Amino acid sequence: MAPAEPSKTLKDNSSESRPLLGWQPDSAAWEALIGRVTEHNIFYVPAFALAAASHLLGASGSNTIGIWRNGDLACLFPGSLAGGPLPVWRALVHPYGPLSTPLVHRFDPESVLASWLDAVAALRPRPRAVILPLMTDEGPVAEALSRLLARRGLQVRRLDAHRRAALTNGAAGPAALGGKRRKELARLRRRLEEAGTPTLTLAPAEAPIAEAIDSYISLERAGWKGRGGTALAADPAAEAFFRRAIAGLAARGEAEIAVTRLDGAPLAATVTLRSGPQAWYWKTAYDEAHARFSPGVLATLDLTARLAADPALAQVDSCAIAGHPMIDRLWSGRLAVSDWIIALPDAGAGFALVVAREQAQRSARRLARRLRDAVRARLGRR
């Protein structure tokens, strides 16, 4: 689909719904909003979101809502309207974008969110509910939205609430490690240094970003994701998205790939994204032939030290699942997220049905994962 032309209407106290790619002509207004947001979300900035829309998303993001105030973009919230007997508007998340906190102007965010909610309710077919997967439960956007819902008397249910690891206020996460674990990691680092010469290169500051992208993709392809068919290299569209998004963000100082090499060969790589005072530890990969040295953990420790020493950062989101066996032991901070389901006006009994449908779908997915894991474990024992 070709990008839409910039809106010809007066951009003053109005709302628009367009496909995500249709917002590309207004990238300048979009970028200006990012400089004034209540909370940052790297997955909704143009360099990332437009790359995802071009290569990955299909119809996802087809009803992205923008709110204009006095000629400026005051809110951008990617999402899609799903029809059927119980229509819902669902905010955009995907395997590479695990956060749905919207971009909302920091001046009077509650009023801006009210305009967004009204714009969603005006879509046709009229949605019964709004679903915000992986939405922050704390922070100024969540607080403003909660006040708005309370003022309007709208129901909200939160499903799959959890707290994922975070590095907050520059706190040094490894300090939370016990002495025994710290000694073990120091021993592993010494063993690695005895095996060869480790070096660390940061891209794009110290090396071309394209070279670092190649190193990350090759490490991932050679590891468990490659064997499982989920590596970027196994999906040309996903690889194209990754290359475009990282190159675009790196050119703006918003992406960094740290590559650890052992005697010149890639050993581990971490990918960090940042927007304003927030960062996201997005991806990591390592050479499993050297797993005895725990290179992924050592690379994460190096990354943690750099992030904790950066006074410009307020918080780093691990983007990890709850209870992650590695990062939860290194970072003691936590970021509360859940899936918000919000009733729209006149939803009636439809809201309870939407919630029940979501719960049933999640139960089915959990059962499917358990069965898959059981089959893999059984096959692995043969």
Image (tube, rainbow, N blue to C red):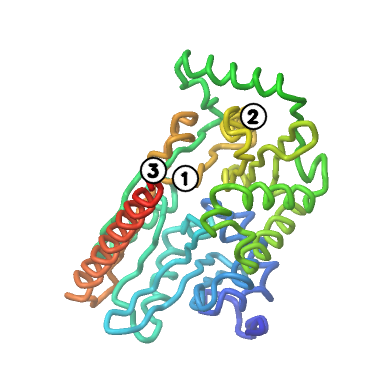
Q: Which residue is mark 1?
A: 320
* Badge number at residue 322: 3
What amino acid is labelled 1 in the image? Ala
In the picture, measured across the screen, residue 160 lies left or right of residue 290, that is left
Q: Which residue is mark 2?
A: 302
In the picture, measured across the screen, residue 146 lies left or right of residue 42, that is left
Would residue 372 be visible to someone looking at this image? Answer: yes
What amino acid is labelled 2 in the image? Asp
Location of the N terminus by quadrant is: bottom right
Residue 152 in picture, x, y percent from top left: 28, 65
Asked whether 331 or 258 is in front, the reply is 258
Badge 1 marks a residue whose secondary structure is loop
Would you identify the image quadrant in which residue 356 lies?
bottom left
Residue 212 in picture, x, y percent from top left: 75, 47
Residue 261 in picture, x, y percent from top left: 74, 35
Do the CB atoms of the residues marked 3 and 1 lie less than 8 Å apart? yes
Q: Residues within 10 Å of mark 1 (few under 14, many from 20)?
A: many
Do the CB atoms of the residues marked 2 and 1 lie less than 8 Å apart? no
Residue 218 in picture, x, y percent from top left: 69, 50
Badge 3 marks a residue whose secondary structure is loop
